[in-house]
Amino acid sequence: MKAKIRHLVIGVLMLTTLIQPSLVTAGIPEAVTYLESQVDDTWITMALVTAGQTGIPTGYLSSVSGTLATDYSKAILALAALGQDPSTFGNSDYVAQLKNHFDGTQIGDANLQNDDIWAILALASVGEVNSSESQTAKDFLLANQNIDGGWGYSVGSGSDTNDTAAAVMALMEAGISATDSVITNALSYIQSAQNSDGGIGYTPGSDSDSGSDSWTISALYKAGIDPATWNQGSNNPITHLESLQDEDGGFWWVQEGTSEWNNKAMTAYAVIALAGETYPVGYYTGQTPDPDTYHLRIEGSNSTICDTYINATTALDIVENAAEVCSYTYNIEETIYGLYLNTINDNIAEGTKGWLYFVNNNSLSVGATDYNLKSGDEVLWYFGDWGWPPTKLSIDETEIDPGQNVNLTAQYFNGSDWLPLPNAIIKVNNVDHVANGAGILALEIVENGAYQLYIEMPEFVRSEKITVTVGDTISQNVGLQVEIDQSSGGRIGGEAIALVVNPAQINFGTLAPGEASSQTVTLENAGTVGLTVGASVTGDTVFISGLAIDDNPYDQYSKDLVPSAIVDADVSLTVPESYLASGVKNGELIFWATSQ
Amino acid sequence: MKIKISLIIIFLTLLLGQSAFAVGVGVKPKKLDVSSKVGKEIKTELLIMNVDDQPAIYSIYPDAIKEQIIIEPNDFSLDANASKIVQLKIKTKNPGLFNTNISVVARPLGATGFAAGSGVKIPLTINSSGIPFLWLVVGILLVCLLAIFAVLLIKRKNKITNLNNKNI
């Protein structure tokens, strides 16, 4: 008997041991594994940062050329999270590019609010939350808060929890207190969309989803509220979000099996929320000191060839290391005196002219290859004669109003001190201005825009450039014209196929067996080729058996659309007399377009 | 008074009905023709565009030969008027001409109840050349068997020779 009991206990223990792994839910590490298997994007980068990952790929952030303000906002947020400078990291100054979308009253598309929200967060991440662009965008959002306390994606649209949560975070970054009625009303709106499963719907009454959970959790953390206190019985947004995680680590959008549209696109947001993070995920606070990175400037005969920070060990290999970054060619030859830099681009050493270098504006008596760089060293190479002194241009203000004066001071370095450079020639967007005998110039700029200023004169090394911004924005109007050929070329050539369906949600109301209801759906060919449009239906049998389009069964629907054509489709539902079920039924109708 | 309120409710219902979400999807190019070799992975791309003024979720999948086509990413959201390039990795197992569609579906974030989605189907034609994977395996097996047979034959021959030597 004892043996039997012992066997039973051992059996139960073994069974428990076997079952236990399947009861363990996935967590952030599994989500990180899932995200790392996905194509890089800004949200994934931010999520990996919050999860404490290192060596996160950044290559895709080096070239951002979007047409939307949010393209730059997302890149800025990701770079700030990585501790990188969004002004210098990529192919352009992303912060300046974002500010270029400011029209004086808001940022980006005047019809959208979403792009203002993310612009504020992006500017906050680089310490520019008090800029006029950010504060004006804040006022724009405040003026467009809906009566229910929320915000929608676009101006005048109904509120949704996702945009409202993001707006809460943006406005708090912009200085609105968590106790302000703007924030408390917004949070009340979000709470009105909480369901009995503890999760949050996109709008009140809609099913809970991981995106809405995630944005809400991050907004609550921002407001200093523990999301776990938003209880519905034993459920809250966190427990609901956790319930959506799959074994591979990804987070389903809605409960598995409830929608054929289900996907794991919200996983990055979920990781950020469950890590207790809010937006911005990180802040860029200035140049990260890197003991092996040095400032290099190369002044050619006619222009500046390079101005960057780069890893190096000597005053010569810094030129080799920066060649790719600054896109120049060079040649170093071996002579009896050692290695000698004789060419950069088309500036070839000849006669008395050659390539010479300074470290911290001092000419050194050792060869460049023998000078080991020390922390804080600045290397300047110039093409000219030996003995040309370096110059420096100083300015009292870099942001002025049109018509306002700036005071410029030109100096040169004599080997020990900076001295006034009399009658210095100062280039202002390539137009010459001459300083007085003390090297001083009072300059009036009347036109809005961005101006580059530097000293360039014979027998002196060109100075570093400084930028002056005149007016509220640095944008200037330039007439542009181009003819686009869609038939070939481009990374992805060929014609585009596009279809817009409006509305994307159909409510047939309450129907009894035998009754029918219909709604009109508009189809628009938004592409460049003719379309043939068909339809498919999934979901409850009432839709599969009773749905018709233009009085024909949906699977017989076919409509040809020429480019830009807009047609109406009459979508009707007849509940069969034999239909026995009751309650709200869900389904989906997809209009499929194929090119003709 | 009750009639007035009813009229207002009907008006608001109609108004809200009109302002419901739209959803749009654009894809470029309109069709894909690729040539490949059996067992060798080739890559091609599709540009997915949100051609509407509302954000939406996008799903991309092949209608057939799913085990030979990987799409990355295959689920993502796009802001209004934003776009994303997805990569198709195709690795065929047999030679021949294969046709399927790449389905791209857009759905608005806030859709509930009975939703209407917008989808496009991009015809994909794969011209695959080379030796079928199964034949390749059978061929390698045959070569291995022949090699084993040859070794055994040589050993047997040596054994017979040795025996003959002993007999001598």
Image (tube, helix red, strand yellow):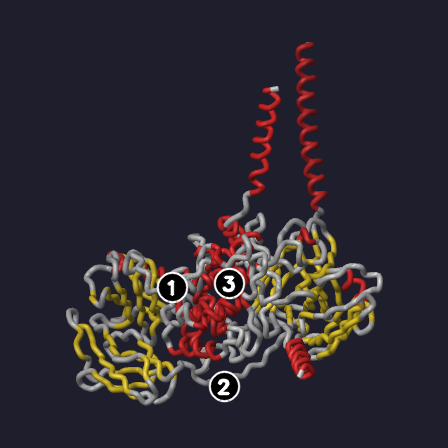
Kindly identify which residue carries mark 1.
Answer: A283
Furthest toward the front, the residue is: B1
* Residue A134: numbered disc: none
Q: Is residue B92 left or right of residue A128?
A: right
Horizontal and vertical percent position of residue A294: 30, 61
Helix, strand or loop at disc 3? helix
Which residue bears the numbered disc 3? A215
Q: Quadrant of the C terminus of chain A?
A: bottom right
- Marks 2 & 3 on one chain: yes
Mark 2, residue position: A479
Crowding at mark 2 (Cα within 10 Å: few <14, some 14-19, many 20+): few
- For mark 2, name the chain: A
Mark whose residue sits in front, 2 or 1 = 1
Give the quadrant of the N terminus of chain A.
Answer: top right
| Mark 2, secondary structure of its residue | loop
Q: Position of residue A424 (x, y in %)?
A: 23, 82
Per the image, label 1 sits on a secondary structure element best described as: loop
Q: Earlier in the sequence, mark 2 or mark 1?
A: 1
For mark 1, does the 10 Å Cα neighbourhood hold few (<14), some (14 to 19), or many (20 or more) residues? many
